[in-house]
Image (spheres, rainbow, N blue to C red):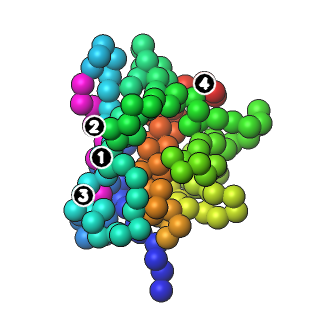
Amino acid sequence: MSNNQILFQFGANPFNMKMKDGSDRLACTVEEVGRNPNPIIRLTREAPWAQQHPSIMGPDNSFYYLGPQNRPGYIIYGNNRTSIPMANLLKKKNDGSTSKYFTTLGGRECKWKKFSAKRMECIDGRTTLAVWEMSDPDDDHNAILTIKSGGMSVITEILTTLTLNLMAQTMEWPDI
């Protein structure tokens, strides 16, 4: 029996997308919520979905404060006043690496490893926490995110950094 959670991504624009589970329950919403003067994007982990999974911990929201000309800015989790530079969540350890490292709110170092333009895996040490794969053009969704049981406790960080990686790819931000 698999404890994996499958989310279907609807929308190719990482600044405006939704993720739903197999029961068509909204799990995550990403949308612009303001400008100050640059765009502010909010990722919301939806409560009806999250309440189905008691192992979920952490904040319900993360906010992306973009810099001038939609350059990398900073992220704030929940109501926390601590801002995290986006560069800290997109770190590369080696020049030729396809991995982008980040630290969870609990202090765990994880990485998103890009296997191709259509597939990334979120890894904690040797444990895969989540797999993101683009869907076929004929599918009604744009991508599938498979969350392993070990990833549910850090799902907000997984969703936040996945979305940030997709933003960086869409905006063609240089490697940080």
Which residue is at 63% across, 41% downward?
100
Disc nearest the viewer among 1 and 2: 1
Which residue is at 30% across, 13% downward?
37
Disc nearest the viewer among 4 and 1: 1
Q: Nearer the viewer, residue 100 or 153?
A: 153
Residue 109 x/y as whole percent: 64, 49
Q: Which residue is mark 1?
A: 44
Closer to the chain start, of discs 2 and 4, is 2
Q: Residues within 10 Å of mark 4 (few under 14, many from 20)?
A: few
Q: Which residues are magenta?
A: 26-34
Q: Which quadrant does the C terminus fall into?
A: top right
Instruction: Tell me: residue 108, above or below residue 40.
Output: below
In this rendering, would 129 be left or right of 8? right
Disc nearest the viewer among 2 and 4: 2
Closer to the chain start, of discs 1 and 2, is 2
Q: Which residue is mark 4?
A: 174
